[in-house]
Image (cartoon, rainbow, N blue to C red):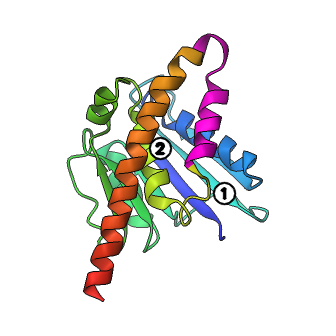
Amino acid sequence: MQTASVVMAGFGGQGLLLAGKILAHAAMAAGLEVSWLPSYGPEMRGGTANVTVCMSPSPIGSPLVGRPSALVVMNQPSMEKFAPRVRPGGVIVVDTSMVPKDPERPDCVVVRVAAREVAKAAGADRSANFVMLGAYVGAAIGGACAVSLERIEAAVAEEFEGDKAKWVPSNLTALRAGFEIGRKAAADADALAGAQS
């Protein structure tokens, strides 16, 4: 396995830093070297926020990533900033609830997820970030993501302990719904690539 790197970007308050933290914890539990590098503005909510997570079997030289292997994006400005940087063959997960424009990257697997609607349908209105995390894992597992769904689920349960444990079932439902969307998008992209070759 090579180093997998993902940028998760959107507005502050959408929960992407938390999603990145859970991914990093799951990767550490899998025995990988991990870096978690958040970046956000001074606003509590509504400003830009992103986090870069690197996962590798060997030491990570720098947490700064110029060409990530994946992008999870929940707003248009972040899509315009980060989508051109994703490596060819990478994965781009787009929240179509918040991002009206397509990333226009035919050289990547693009997963389009109406995250808020999927979260609502899963009974987890506030878990769009977990839908997006699940879609990333489903589309990128074994490549741009080095962590299994089961490890992510365990990290969610660890994050929401004590009084917050009541949120675990709904967050896991949202995570699994996103995972199925991501897995289907990756399978469709593989089938299309096979038909074209």
Question: What residue sits 50% from the left and 24% below the top?
Answer: 169
Dot 2: element? helix
Seen from the viewer's position, the closer of residues 153 and 102 is: 153
**With respect to residue 105, does 100 lie above or below?**
above
Q: From the viewer's perspective, tell me whether residue 133 is left or right of residue 152.
A: left
Q: In this view, does 101 lie above or below 178?
A: below
Q: In this view, does 162 lie to the left or right of 182?
A: right
Callout 2, which amino acid?
A: Leu
Q: In which quarter of the image is the N terminus?
A: bottom right
Regarding residue 26, the answer to whether it shows in the image is yes
Q: Can residue 129 be seen in this view?
A: no
Q: Position of residue 112 (x, y in %)?
A: 29, 52
Disc number for residue 133: 2
Residue 161 lies in the magenta stretch = yes
Q: Name the residue under label 1.
A: 55
Residue 149 is situated, as x and y percent measured from the top left of the image, at 55, 47
Q: What stretch is highlighted in magenta?
A: 149-164
**Residue located at (54% from left, 15% from top):** 166
Mark 2 Cα shell of 10 Å, populated few (<14), some (14-19), many (≥20): many
Secondary structure mainly formed by the magenta segment: helix
How far from the left and from the top, in percent, is residue 65?
59, 61
